[in-house]
Image (spheres, rainbow, N blue to C red):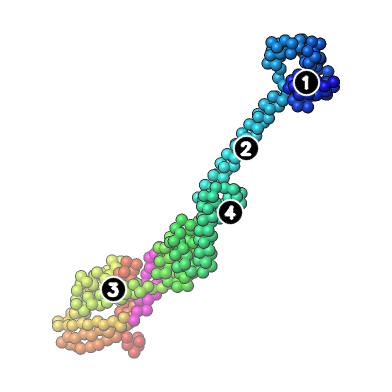
Amino acid sequence: MIINCPECGHQTSDKAPTCPNCGVEIAGKIKICTNCRQAYFTSDKECPQCNPKRKKQNTTNRKPWHSAVMIAAVFAALIIATTLYFNKEKTRSKENNAYELAVRSDDPRLMENFLNNFPNATPEHIAAIQKKLQLVNSIQDEWSKARQSKSKSDLQNFLTKYPNTTHKAEIQNLIDSIDWAETEKSNTIDAYQQYLEEHPYSNHAPIARENIKKINTQTVQPEERTAIDNLLTNFFRSINSRSEEALTATLSPNMTSFNNIAAPTQEDVLQWMRRQYKEEGTHILWRLNHQLNIQKREIGDNAYEYTVKLNGTEEIKNNLQNSTNNYNITAIVSPDHKISSININKITDENP
């Protein structure tokens, strides 16, 4: 039997399981009004067509199934949209963190990781990282060239241009090695002292100080030779000028030997000079050849004693004689550059 669906009015069979239009159940759920011959739901006690007030009440209370489906669909869509939103925000946050880390770093790996992990990042972020990566790669090329050159000037120029480079410690070590190699090659006190001024905390610094000490122990430096020459020159000039004060100024207060006299005093030396001038009108002129043979000996911490050999000529003029004699002179100079021992021996056929 063909009926009008009591829900939507669409014609359908009373044997149909559901209405093909609205989906409401039909078979076993409807009955035919004996008055108006219209189908209505068995849950209704009276025919809604014959009792309009009853129809309105039933229509208001009935909740068709497709309304619940629509509500569920809307709720699901809301959940999906919310999930997508938070996932997008999470991805954006990760992108921002990775960007800040990469843009502040000089490590190209962090920049490459950002570009690989966030291909859909904002164009501004991608452009900034690409620019920074290009700059870092350019600097890395400069560093490779400077390092391979093994040139001190190239390394210093790179460090001057990029003072905050991550290679700073390595550059300083390379320069240290270059300077140390040059210093060892020179092997002079000046070279070692200059190295210590430039690299006071280097691992080579203790070796440099030890080498200075060895050189000082073994080698008479030019300034030492000059000081000793001046000291002996002043000794003999004071004799020439007959200046006791100047002569005393050249002598150590604790002399060990003078003309083979042990433990002499300064007064002993002055008495010797006075005897040289005992004849009235005596003039004495000492001349040194200044060809000093100096042996150096360490007698304390950075304290050195010098044994000096040289030749000199003495001219004496007075009323009794006019003579010239040659002498071998052996002196010992103390660390404070005073004469602690001096022996003046005339050169003769028996004592050349």
Indicate the position of residue 208 as horizontal and vertical percent values.
45, 65
Query: Which residue is under mark 2?
Result: 84
Question: Foreground mark, 2 or 4?
Answer: 2
Task: Magenta stretch: give its range.
Answer: 291-309
Query: Which residue is under mark 1?
Result: 4
Question: Is the C-beta separation of discs 3 and 4 under 8 Å?
Answer: no
State how far apart marks 2 and 4 are (Cα).
Answer: 27 Å
Which residue appears at 44% of the width and 58% of the height? 163
State how far apart marks 3 and 4 are (Cα).
Answer: 74 Å
State how far apart marks 2 and 1 are (Cα).
Answer: 45 Å
**Amino acid type, label 4:** Glu
Could you say whether the residue bearing mark 2 is in a helix, strand or loop? helix
Magenta region's main secondary structure? Answer: strand
Q: Earlier in the sequence, mark 2 or mark 3?
A: 2
Query: Which residue is under mark 3?
Result: 231
Q: Earlier in the sequence, mark 3 or mark 4?
A: 4
Say if residue 260 shows up in the picture.
no
**Amino acid type, label 2:** Leu
Could you say whether the residue bearing mark 4 is in a helix, strand or loop? helix
Could you say whether the residue bearing mark 3 is in a helix, strand or loop? helix
